[in-house]
Image: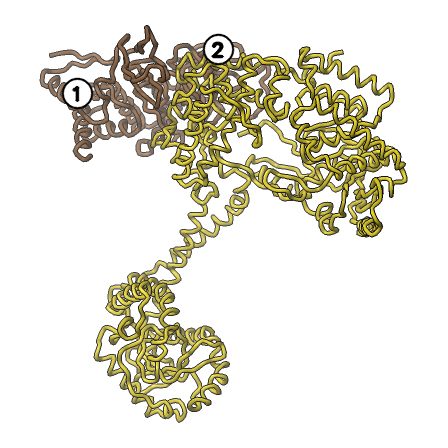
Chain colours: A yellow, B brown
Amino acid sequence: MLPDHVNMVLLSATVPNAYEFADWIGRTKQKKIFVTRTSQRPVPLEHCLYYSGELYKICENKLFLAQGVKAAKDAFNAKKSTPRAGGSSGQAGSFTAPGRGAAGHGGHKNSKGAPGQRSSASMVMAQKNSSGGWRSEASQWYSLIKNLSGKGFLPVVVFCFSKNRCDKSADSLTAIDLTSTSEKNEIRVFCNKGFSRLRGSDRQLPQVVRVEELLRRGIGVHHAGLLPIVKEVVEMLFCRGVIKVLFSTETFAMGVNAPARTVAFHSFRKHDGKTFRQLLPGEYTQMAGRAGRRGLDKVGTVIIMCWDEIPEEADLMRLLTGEPTNLESQFRLTYNMILNLLRVEDLKVEDMLKRSFAEFHAQRALPEQQQQLKEGEGELLQMNTTINCILGDPTIEEYFELAVEAEGLGEELHEAVMQSKGVQSLLVPGRVVVVYTPPLPVPTLGVILRASTPSSGSKNWIILAVNRGSNAFDSSISKATSGDSLSESITDGYYISRKSNRGLEDEYSVSSRASRKSAGVVKVSLPHYGTTGGIGYVAMEIDNKAIVSICKSKIPVDTVRLLEDVSSAAYSLTVQQLLQLEKQYPNQDPPVLDLVKDLKLNDITIIEKYYKRQRLLERMAMNQCHRCTLLHEHYNQFKKQSALKERVRRLKYELSDAALQQMPDFQQRIEVLQEVGCINSELAVQLKGRVACEINSGDELIATECLFENQLVDLDAAEAVALLSALVFQQKDASEPTLSTRLRAAKDRMTATAIRLGSLQAEHGLNIIPQDYAHDTLKFGLVEVVYEWAKGTPFAEICELTNVPEGSIVRTIVRLDETCREFKNAARIIGDSTLYQKMSDASEAIKRDIVFAASLYVTGVPS
Amino acid sequence: MEDVSSRGLHFQLSDSQRNRLRKSRELLREAPGNYHPSAFVNIADPIHVENEATVLKGHGTQVLDGQLLATLSGVVERVDQLVTVKPLRCRYNAETGDVVVGRITEVGTKRWKVDINFRQDVHLMLSAVNLPGGIQRRRTVIDELNMRSLFEENDLISAEVQSVHSDGSVHLHTRSLKYGKLTNGQLVKVPPYLVKRLKQHFHNLKSCAVDMIIGCNGYIWICAAVDSLPSNPEIEKITGDSGAPEMDSCNESISLKVRENICRLANSIRVLSALGFLIYPDTIIDTFDASISKGVAIKDMLGAEFLVMIAEREASRRTKNNYML
């Protein structure tokens, strides 16, 4: 959607699949993309473990040093074995005198009262677990900082993975002063200037005062809970190099270009919203990359803090040298996006989906697939010569369909039937069965001669079957009309048979040995072909799958003479009997055993399937193709043809829009939008849809529904904007606000709407749980705060109302202003002037003081 | 004999034709899908709502002495709690994303003013058009001076509504190859409320080799299909007054058949608009086909007989649908 004339430069330190990504951009934008990548760092990094006052180098110039980890481990073990005595830092730290460490404890304890009084809500929480471990942590910080400053490794950025931890760590360092007098002066002047744009009471906010005090000593804090202006002051001071120790969250690594001499990781596990997990290599690289200032330092040092245990070597290795996670598409369809695309004619949603990075691989394979499709279609065209059936009208299509269905059912059935005890007892020598296995062109009558158990374990049968497929050497068989092609098919079949019967001939010796024990020897080599009276026959070994059905009839067979003496007379006799049987039932197979009566099967589903299959088989037998000698050939031909057709169909599908990954999702969302009334059945955007288009900052569906249900009507401007804060606020664990009855009713109404919409979406197949949906999209944590703010309460007071950090409050209110603007636009589209007025009043009410203080970056620091 | 004047067209109806027209109108009035008579309001009519306090008062409504009144004459529409009055007749009301056909009225600094049948002339910024050659760059003073070479006064263009601002001004854009100057065709103006809003407003009628742009503002452009023309960006519109040699050649490039098709389609639209039927490709083509199958000459399409015939046709179609339902 970006206009073509905008040129792009993309930079990343962590994307491993840059080529792929560049290919995608180049493809979608139809432009050449040049990829340059280097593993060279202007300032090389060295990674260290920090354990009780010592640094253990574990990685230098991208080489992992296992001995470093080992040394750290040794130190760890050595320390474990010696009884722990006194302050942890004093013991190993040659830089920190024990007395100093003790002073640190004291200092911390003494100061505890003071920050406690003026601390924000987050601070209160932080002090809950100031246990013994915590105290030793504070002294560890002292020793680390002493250590680093001794080596000239300051300034350092310490990455902690929670806002609380940042505050806690910074506040614990009460007895440290890292700045010179001139630096102190600089900081003081800068802070005064920076905060000068705040109003009197705002300047006395606990957070401002606290951070200023920290800054004076060269310590900084930086996380999302800070007020924007405080954050900016910290960033700017850090860039000036007067902050020596900065405690920050991950956010500092992104976006802010402020490198340091050293980066320290408080831990390498973080909470990503769901669980605690280890850092990903990509994240580590991003943060570690902050170390080393170009032109100032020769190397950047990265320190991983080990508090009470040494991390596993494998983990470290993975973290330091592992491949960063591949860039993946995060493109998700939203209702807003769909509506915006639907109302302009130029862009189709399908096109948008196609251009997504997620579809990149599919799109890249496109020309190839198109080629394949062309080939397939060409082949199909060639194949499409009609099958010349000798029996007149080709009913092969019907036959094929029947056969495929029967096959599917048969396979299921076979397992069940053949394993039942009844069947095993029925399949005795002499039993007539219908056999269909590769050497035989059509399902044929056969008679069981003997059961054999090959090594593979499953039971096999030796059978004698009429070989109507006309062996090549018997040209006298009347039905063989097209000898050449047939003989070919037979020999083909022969080889297939060997394969499908799992190399029967090889196995035969095994099976014959097995059978010798029980009855006698099989002397005939299987499969054994022969002819008698112009009719071919074959004796062979088959497995369960080849038996199509079991007939009621039984004929006497002389197993010994057939298999051991190989008497042609015996064969002739048996074949004659089979043929006679066949003649009795012209055009169909002899009656088969009833599943229920004879086999005593009583599983209802099996029986149902069985009957269905029987009916299919009957129809197959009625089909004139059933007895056709060319059946096998035609069948194969047809099979190939339909396989090709299937392939072409599948390729076509893949090339069409329907194969897009997000297509089902898109369809479901379209249905939801239609149900709600945002678009009509012709996908033209309706009034409701136009309103939903305006709303970007929250869940557009809920907001639109609330608007059209006129939920804001009985609220005044302050209440309305407070209610809307639910749409933009995001923090989960905010304290429950105390609300007036009117607001509580409004809140309940809104939640009910959300649940209704959630269940509507769930009905249309979207993966949404209504309760969770309402809970995730509407967060009422700041309703009270915003209400008070809109009524003009000073910022310091509203901060007392909640546990939400000041920075989050400011951010929410700023976004809320955006929401007000969107609602204003919506009101204009609807035509309701009172709502319009209400929203602009609300916008006026929240736009004041600290929340909307202009950014220092934009205006510059006043001098 | 009686005369019927409808939307700029003048029909002379005989008595029988008048009766037939009246009859089909009655049928249409009772056809399903119509508004209930109570939905129609006149200016200052009270609108009945259950609870005046909870409804959203949309366009065309106002509260006076605790009563919700209509400020327009039209149809009351409700969406959830929202009550609006949709006027029966109105000017075009621009909405973002609409495809419109407009006429340049003025070339100003960095912008053209365009008449799209809106309350005021709308703006087409120089920065919102594609420059010739498709090169994307910043617009310079030179470009500003050359604006007339792109669009002159009285040129017809197709464009999309880019944004509607809170002060009521509207901006267009032509940042796509399918938008731009319109040539080789005919413009038909119909009331904008008769144009049905669809997903597609560009239509290519392959059977007649004609392209049609049904602007949401009621301006409909019918021209020879672009594929059948040699692509010559300099061609002027055929209705131009001066006879430059290129123009003659471009006139000739359209075959008589296509020109007839264009006129027939244009007249179909005129008839539909005279009868006040919704205008969208289906109805247009239906009328077009009917005129061919009945062998009506193009000039007779604006005659009384054809008008009555189309009305009867529509009436029977709708009542038939009724039985099917």
Q: In the rendered picture of this protein, how many numbered marks are placed on residues?
A: 2
Q: In the rendered image, which residue does mark 1 sit on?
A: B25
* Residue A301 visible here: yes
Separation of marks 2 and 1 at Cα, in angstroms = 46 Å
Mark 2 element type: strand
Q: In which quarter of the image is residue A272?
A: top right
Q: How crowded is mark 2: few (under 14 residues within 10 Å), some or many (20 or more)?
A: some
The residue under the point 36% across, 28% down is A677
Compared to residue A355, the image places residue B16 above or below, namely: above
Dividing the picture into quadrants, the one containing residue A521 is bottom left
- Which of marks 1 and 2 precedes in the sequence? 1
Give amino acid for label 1.
Arg
Position of residue A576 measured from the top left corner of the image (x, y, whole percent): 27, 86
Question: In the rendering, at what x and y percent does residue A133 appear?
Answer: 75, 39
Q: Mark 2 lies on which chain?
A: B
Q: Would you name the residue on which mark 2 appears?
A: B107
**Residue in front for this viewpoint, A299 or A106:** A106
Question: For residue A558, which numbered disc appears in the image?
Answer: none
Label 1 sits on a secondary structure element that is helix
Q: Which amino acid does label 2 sit on?
A: Val
Q: In which quarter of the image is residue A160?
A: top right
Pointer 2 with pointer 1, Cβ within 8 A: no
Outermost residue on the top side: it is B65
Residue A543 place in picture, x, y as percent:
41, 76
Compared across the picture, whether A790 is left or right of A203 comes to left
Tag 1, which chain? Answer: B
On the image, the x and y values in percent for residue B208 come to 31, 31
Nearer to us in this view, B13 or A675: A675
Q: Is residue A32 left or right of residue A516?
A: right
Q: In this view, does B307 lie to the left or right of A823?
A: left
Relative vertical location of residue A447 with respect to residue A259 in this rendering, above or below: below
